[in-house]
Image (cartoon, helix red, strand yellow):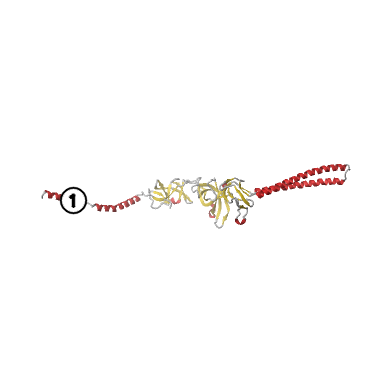
Amino acid sequence: MSFDEQALAALRRQQAPDPGRYRPATRRRRLVWALPLLLLAAAVVWWVSGDVPQEVELVEVAPPLEGGVVAVLSASGYVVAERRATVSAKVTGRVSEILFEEGALVEAGQVLARLDDRNAEAARDLALRQSDAARLEVREVEVRLDEARRELGRVEQLRAEQLISAAALDRATAEVAALAARLEGARAAVSVARAAVQVRERELDDLVVRAPFGGVVVFKDAQPGEMVSPISAGGGYTRTGIASVVDMQSLEIHVDVNEAYLNRVFEGQLAEAVLDAYPDWRIAARVRAIVPTADRQKATVRVRVAFDTLDSRILPDMGAKVRFLSRTETAGPQPVALVPAGAILEQGGTTSVWRVEEGVARRVVVRAGTEAEGRRAILAGVAPGDLVVVDPPDALAEGAAVRARTPD
């Protein structure tokens, strides 16, 4: 074989395809199919390993109640003002002036409104003039009586000297007696006139509407130009009130307690109130009184609960929940925390909870106490401020990553 033929044969051997190598197109197709499978396998391994946090309901452990007390009953009610008044005028009249706004703080006796007083002022002025006329008449009679008495003295002297008849003496005496009686009548007329002035002034004062006690104006029920009356009149076009005043120092809670649980409530009992507007604010309170009557339709008894300390955030007609408390009589260990009853797990005689630390669930053995109102007392194992899982799922495992469930 010549040299050229040997070189061509070598080149043909180098260009021949290698049966052990993949073609590029086939390799790319296999990679496209294999990539999703690899990602799915990685996700499964990631999930099994616990790297994907499970959504659970987390609740912060609450501190125990102070003073060794436990809740024995819970009820709902409303904030009510013991002193609340709808202020109206004593007489029917037209409003001429309003001197307050809703939400204003007023003092006892403060002027809230005035009615049209032109007629009352005219009547008062007439009574004053009549009183002045009565006093002038008294003065006139007093002058005449003084003159008559001096005349009587002269007549008596002349009669003693036998210079005039007895009839003249009798006439002078009668004149003095008549003027004395007239003076008494004039003085009585002055008293009547003064009383009439006082009546007219009282009528004028009745046209001024004042606050019956100190408090806050919560409603404005009339405007200038409207007619007001202490009784309903005018076919509904006459107002019966001008303002509603509430004494904020008399706020308390009225709750209806089922008569089946009334034996758990007593006067002076400690209580804890939570307003619907401030669910995280616990207000110390106590039972003021138990109204001695029952509601036949609802089978409840009304209980009045007083706040230990009033606050400006407490407003009339707010919804509230009251927990009635009772002191524990046992000398054993006292609770260190309160957790929802749904967080407690009891298996094989062991009581535990799932505590979450830095997003990881750890099962912790606890010593549990009594349960009341859906919360369990904890004697040891967790502390206030810890996060626990409520109603944990069966698949929750030790060391699993968890996160708080977002509300729907």
| Residue 86 seen from this side | no
Pinpoint residue 394: horizontal percent, then vertical percent: 39, 53
Q: Observer-nearest residue: 98 or 395?
A: 98
Q: How many marks?
A: 1
Residue 96 at x, y percent in the picture = 61, 49
Percent of width and height locating residue 108 = 61, 46
Outermost residue toward the left? 1
Amino acid type indicated by mark 1: Gln
- For the residue pair 249 and 362, the one nearer the viewer reads as 249
Outermost residue, bottom direction? 297
Is 39 situated left or right of 70 in this image?
left
Q: Secondary structure at mark 1?
A: helix
Extreme right residue here?
Answer: 162
Q: Which residue is mark 1?
A: 15
Q: Residues within 10 Å of mark 1 (few under 14, many from 20)?
A: few
Q: Is residue 124 left or right of residue 376?
A: right
Residue 378 picture location, percent across and down: 45, 47
Above or below, 374 relative to 151: below
Q: Nearer the viewer, residue 274 or 21?
A: 21
* Residue at 57% over, 55% down: 294
**Residue 4 visible here:** yes
316 lies left or right of 24: right
